[in-house]
Image: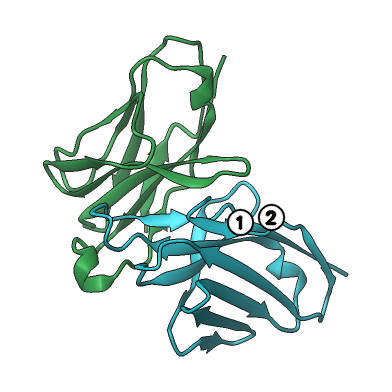
Amino acid sequence: RKEVEQDPGPFNVPEGATVAFNCTYSNSASQSFFWYRQDCRKEPKLLMSVYSSGNEDGRFTAQLNRASQYISLLIRDSKLSDSATYLCVVNRWGTGRRALTFGSGTRLQVQP
Amino acid sequence: NAGVTQTPKFQVLKTGQSMTLQCAQDMNHEYMSWYRQDPGMGLRLIHYSVGAGITDQGEVPNGYNVSRSTTEDFPLRLLSAAPSQTSVYFCASTPDRSWVATLGGELFFGEGSRLTVL
């Protein structure tokens, strides 16, 4: 089983739609969580951190469910510019190896 | 601001050749790392360094060497290229030396190096 699993998509949605992605992680000792965004043939960039209480940044909302070991990203009022791959990222706490583990990403295509 | 600079951006090698991917950052970041990205696999950590003179292995270190003689530079060496090393390689850095203190943080990536091994 992969440490971080995501539905690869693609999610094809019209402009203005609300779309949600889920991500599951296997290491229950993981402490910190992030969503990164990667445009086609570009480098990943941090979109937002995910806090235990949930957090919002404009049209983006991230949630964490420790009991079920998943995190989610909700995008409201989708824009064409939101088209990208969204990477779920988890801190590998307690493994003695200081690194982030990346999911393989969920591709979003927002259509006019 | 240059940020994280990787060279070359594209490279084609023949099986058995060796080469070095260069990574330099001008942000005085202590932590630097190399990832490879393959379709459907996500980014996988090859090697990382928490400061000059200190390196450690990641998930997929075989076939790669690294060194960290300065804070700024973290080159990745392919010893004897194989077709399985065809990938996109990303160098990433962060100011945080201590993951314990910060529980991870933002990684700043270079633009990537696309390597094809024939």
Check residue A8 in the rendering and tell me which mark sits there, or answer none: 2
Element assignment for label 1 = loop
**Placement of B76 over or under A76, stated as above or below:** above
Q: Chain letter for mark 2, please.
A: A
Asked if the residues shown at circle 1 and circle 2 are in contact, with their CB atoms under 8 angstroms apart, the answer is: yes
Residue B27 falls left or right of residue B81: left
**Residue A100 locus on image (x, y percent):** 38, 57
**Residue B92 locus on image (x, y percent):** 37, 51
The quadrant holding residue B8 is top left
Position of the C terminus of chain A by quadrant: bottom right
Out of A69 and A72, give the one closest to the viewer. A69
**Residue A102 locus on image (x, y percent):** 48, 55
Chain B appears in which tint?
green
Q: Which chain is cyan?
A: A
Coloured how? by chain
**Placement of A12 over or under A51, stated as above or below:** above
Q: Chain letter for mark 1, please.
A: A
Q: Residues within 10 Å of mark 1 (few under 14, many from 20)?
A: many
Out of B74 and A106, give the one closest to the viewer. A106
**Residue A24 locus on image (x, y percent):** 55, 65
Q: Residues within 10 Å of mark 2 (few under 14, many from 20)?
A: some
Furthest residue toward left: B53
Check residue A105 in the rendering and tell me which mark sits there, or answer none: 1
Residue at (46, 78) in percent of width and height:
A66
Residue B95 falls left or right of residue A102: left
Q: Amino acid at mark 2?
A: Pro
Q: Amino acid at mark 1?
A: Gly
Element assignment for label 2 = loop
Q: Do badges 1 and 2 share one subunit?
A: yes
Residue B90 falls left or right of residue B39: left
